[in-house]
Image (cartoon, rainbow, N blue to C red):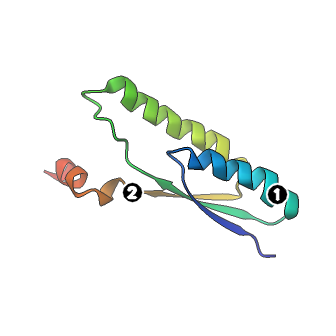
């Protein structure tokens, strides 16, 4: 076996589910096989000026999933989807 490739939305509960699956199933079946995580990050849905506490909490959640997932996976490749939202992109450019 060459290894595992996992894709998960890490800003929701799927990141924790991917961590559990990697620890309890993949590492048990093939302990030396590398596990790569393609981490899909969605943009922070809270406007910093209007909902500061929720915006900060979403940033804290990002730090927590990084701390939880990095020891489990051999490589984490983050994909930030914030710029796919045209309204968000236009608000940042203009």
Apparent side of residue 84 relative to residue 58 in the rendered image (left or right): left
- Which residue shows up at 41% across the image and 50% down it? 42
Q: Is residue 34 above or below residue 68?
A: below
Q: Please provide percent x and percent y for residue 89.
A: 23, 54
- Farthest residue to the top: give it: 53
Question: In this figure, which residue is indicated by the disc labeled 2?
Answer: 81
**Which structural element holds mark 2?**
loop
Q: Is residue 31 above or below residue 20?
A: below
Question: In this figure, which residue is indicated by the disc labeled 1?
Answer: 27
Please name whichever residue, 70 or 28, is drawn nearer the observer in this view of the structure. Answer: 28
**Which structural element holds mark 1?**
helix
Among the two numbered marks 2 and 1 on one chain, the one whose residue lies closer to the N terminus = 1
Other-residue count near label 1 (Cα within 10 Å), few / some / many at <14 / 14–19 / ≥20: some
Apparent side of residue 5 relative to residue 12 in the rendered image (left or right): right
Q: Please provide percent x and percent y for residue 91.
A: 18, 48
Identify the image quadrant of residue 3: bottom right
Residue 46 visible somewhere in the drawing: yes
Other-residue count near label 2 (Cα within 10 Å), few / some / many at <14 / 14–19 / ≥20: few
């Amino acid at each position: 076996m060459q290894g595992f490739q996992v894709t998960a939305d890490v800003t929701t509960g799927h990141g924790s589910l991917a961590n559990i699956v990697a620890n309890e199933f993949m590492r048990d079946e093939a302990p030396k096989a590398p596990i790569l995580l393609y981490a899909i990050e969605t943009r922070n849905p809270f406007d910093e000026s209007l909902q500061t506490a929720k915006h900060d909490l979403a940033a804290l959640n990002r730090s927590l999933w990084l701390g939880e997932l990095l020891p489990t996976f051999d490589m984490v490749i983050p994909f930030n989807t914030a710029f796919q939202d045209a309204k968000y992109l236009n608000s940042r450019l203009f």
